Amino acid sequence: MPLLRALRNITAQARNQGLWAAVHIVRERATVRWRERQLSMSTEAVLSLEELGITDKSYRHYVPANYNYIDVALQSINVDETDVFLDIGSGMGRVLTEIRIGGASVTASIIS
């Protein structure tokens, strides 16, 4: 059951790294779920190199950008409809989606 597993993970986190770390993780997960539900998308996955079909160990597994970090970065620049943003290696598109919401023009191209 996902809820029971989540509670076990939170309890383990609180035991291993303290209550504040567990609260931070719950807050982050809730933010991700809320944002992605609003956008009708799911980018929460962590994908291994094997899942991506990559055998070169010099590459790292896919981990999505943190929404809070994206917000901080976007607040430091003024994005409007005249801006064009190029994200090389955009993963599942979190940054591009947030840039588009901010008003910039986004054109996606998938190269595999």
Image (cartoon, rainbow, N blue to C red):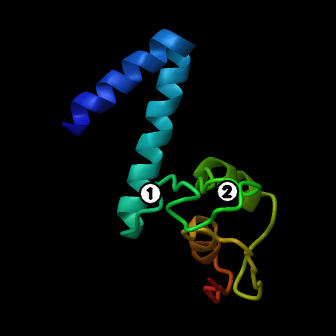
* Residue at disc 2, secondary structure: helix
Residue to which mark 1 is pinned: 35
Name the residue rendered at 30%, 25% in the picture.
7
Name the residue rendered at 62%, 65% in the picture.
54
Q: Position of residue 98 (x, y in %)?
A: 60, 68
Q: Position of residue 12 (x, y in %)?
A: 42, 17
Would residue 80 be found to the left or right of residue 95 on screen?
right
- The answer to whether residue 18 of the structure is visible from this angle is no
Q: Residues within 10 Å of mark 2 (few under 14, many from 20)?
A: some
Furthest-right residue in this view: 77
Residue nearer the viewer, 69 or 93: 93
Which amino acid type is shown beneath numbered disc 1? Arg
**Image: 58 above or below 25:** below
The quadrant in which the N terminus is found is: top left
Name the residue rendered at 78%, 69% in the picture.
78
Q: Position of residue 25 (x, y in %)?
A: 50, 32
Q: In the rendering, which numbered label is found on residue 14?
A: none
Name the residue rendered at 69%, 53% in the picture.
60
* Among the 4 quarters of the image, the one containing residue 85: bottom right
Residue nearer the viewer, 83 or 8: 8
* Residue at disc 1, secondary structure: helix
Which amino acid type is shown beneath numbered disc 2? Ile
Q: CA distance from mark 1 to mark 2?
A: 13 Å
Residue to which mark 2 is pinned: 70
- The answer to whether residue 34 of the structure is visible from this angle is yes
Q: Earlier in the sequence, mark 1 or mark 2?
A: 1
Q: Residues within 10 Å of mark 1 (few under 14, many from 20)?
A: some
